[in-house]
Image (tube, rainbow, N blue to C red):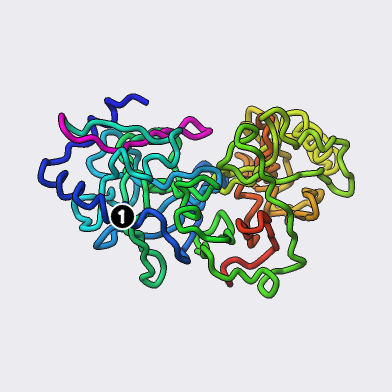
């Protein structure tokens, strides 16, 4: 981390600085929270006709509350939003969070418990010649980066439910791929700085509505998620695999993927292709990734079998980017082979709209694309595959349950 970037963004007047530092004890006392909450979640913006985006959780920070909309990301821990004064910020539809307008905002000192929760993220910096405070640096898989100050403030959820002293990052230098109208990211991972961990909830659930729409749904934190009465089909349950910290990323939710079926053909791919080996590979479920990605050798088998069964001409790669796409007559909706993911004790039988998307070509014909990418050795189950699916993370019992659902009706 280049500390100079953080220092350049502080710019706090001495009086304001001392007022915020005076709130240390209040933030320290509230560092471990306990409470249930819910918040609206809606699909983010997308462009170029390809429906790859994030899902945004809507809440408010501060007193009085200032609205933010954060990417709901089960693949990271830190909660952060862009703040005034911003050294380098991406465009967002809402005003930057203004710490000077919040009477409950507090900087976190270097010796605070929160500053020591995740040493891979936090660092101590000088605000001036006499005052030090906790800062953070986080990068993501797409090379996006956020740098700023670690702070605490009141978070307000649905129906006025509020929780004091939530630790979050005030982003002052943020660069990378932020195209979904988000103001930051809400980490829902397993680490100590994530929202579920700070709230000390035993479970949380989300039900993402259709990614190309605008209808909101709800994320529930430690609130009853009735998958059985609201689901459309049998509830599936599979273990969340926990590894030793030196074996895997402690933030991520690992699953035991056993195999893949295309059409009626169980593909000849060994289980080891999806397993964690010597700290690499494995299978995770990640709401902050748009499209599911498979290891190269697995992707090739899936692609070839899909192409053999769909019996449509393959569109040249330079016309469709990194997606495998097929040309179909205008107005036609040809049958596509089924796609099923087999987990330990559970089957994810994906509906058509969760693994293909369609875009028109210049001639008015339809291009049908397989919504799966070739990735690295880690298999990632993305949010496109989780549309209209109620997903419950049972943290207490280390289980993941899911069922098809009409998410806008829950």
Above or below for 178 versus 398: above
Q: Residue at x 12, y 41 (%)?
A: 13
Q: Indicate yes or no whether the magenta region holds residue 143.
A: yes
Q: Residue at x 35, y 59 (%)?
A: 155
Quarter holding the N terminus is top left
Q: Quadrant of residue 226?
A: bottom right
- Measuring from the top left, give residue 336's x and y in whole percent: 79, 49
Question: In front here: 397 or 267?
Answer: 397
Q: Residue at x 76, y 67 (%)?
A: 233
Q: Quadrant of residue 175?
A: top left
- Measuring from the top left, give residue 27's x and y in whole percent: 30, 53
Q: Indicate yes or no whether the magenta region holds residue 74.
A: no
- Which contiguous range is marked in magenta? 129-145
Residue 388 visible to the viewer? no
Q: Residue at x 60, y 39 (%)?
A: 362
Q: Residue furthest left?
A: 15
- Measuring from the top left, give residue 128's x and y in whole percent: 17, 32
- Measuring from the top left, give residue 314's x and y in whole percent: 75, 34
Quarter holding the C terminus is bottom right
- Give left or right: position of 385 versus 135: right
| Residue beneath disc 1 | 153
Question: In front here: 192 or 407?
Answer: 192
């Amino acid at each position: 981390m280049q500390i100079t970037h953080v220092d350049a963004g502080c710019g706090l007047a001495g009086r304001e600085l001392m007022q915020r530092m005076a709130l240390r004890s209040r933030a320290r006392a509230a560092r471990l929270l306990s409470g249930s909450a819910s918040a609206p979640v809606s699909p983010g913006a997308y462009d170029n006709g390809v429906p790859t985006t994030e899902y945004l959780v809507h809440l408010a920070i501060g007193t009085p509350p200032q609205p933010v909309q954060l990417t709901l990301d089960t693949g990271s821990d830190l909660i952060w939003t862009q703040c005034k004064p911003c050294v380098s910020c991406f465009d967002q539809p809402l005003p930057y969070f203004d710490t000077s307008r919040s009477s409950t905002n507090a900087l976190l000192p270097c010796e605070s418990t929160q500053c020591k929760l995740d040493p891979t993220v936090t660092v101590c910096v000088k605000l001036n010649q006499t005052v030090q405070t906790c800062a953070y640096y986080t990068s993501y898989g797409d090379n996006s980066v956020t740098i700023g100050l670690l702070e605490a403030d009141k978070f307000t959820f649905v129906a006025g439910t509020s929780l004091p002293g939530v630790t979050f990052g005030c982003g002052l230098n943020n660069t990378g791929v932020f195209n979904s109208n988000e103001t930051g990211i809400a980490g829902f991972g397993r680490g100590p700085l994530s929202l579920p961990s700070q709230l000390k909830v035993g479970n949380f659930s989300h039900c993402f509505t259709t990614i190309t729409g605008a209808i909101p749904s709800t994320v529930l934190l430690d609130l009853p998620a009735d998958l059985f009465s609201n689901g459309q089909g049998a509830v599936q349950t599979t273990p969340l695999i926990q590894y030793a910290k030196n074996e895997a990323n402690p933030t991520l939710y690992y699953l035991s993927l056993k195999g893949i079926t295309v059409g009626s053909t169980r593909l000849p791919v060994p289980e080891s292709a999806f397993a964690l080996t010597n700290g690499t590979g494995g299978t995770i479920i990640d709401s902050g990734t748009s499209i599911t990605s498979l290891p190269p050798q697995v992707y090739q088998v899936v692609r070839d079998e899909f192409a053999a069964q769909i019996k449509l001409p393959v569109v040249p790669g330079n016309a469709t980017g990194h997606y495998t796409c097929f040309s179909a007559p205008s107005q036609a909706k040809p049958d596509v082979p089924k796609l099923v993911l087999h987990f330990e004790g559970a089957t994810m039988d994906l509906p058509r709209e969760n693994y293909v998307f369609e875009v028109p070509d210049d001639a008015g014909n339809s291009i049908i694309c397989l919504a799966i990418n070739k990735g690295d050795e880690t298999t990632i189950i993305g949010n496109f595959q989780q549309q209209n699916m109620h997903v419950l993370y049972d943290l207490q019992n280390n289980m993941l349950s899911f069922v098809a659902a009409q998410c806008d009706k829950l």
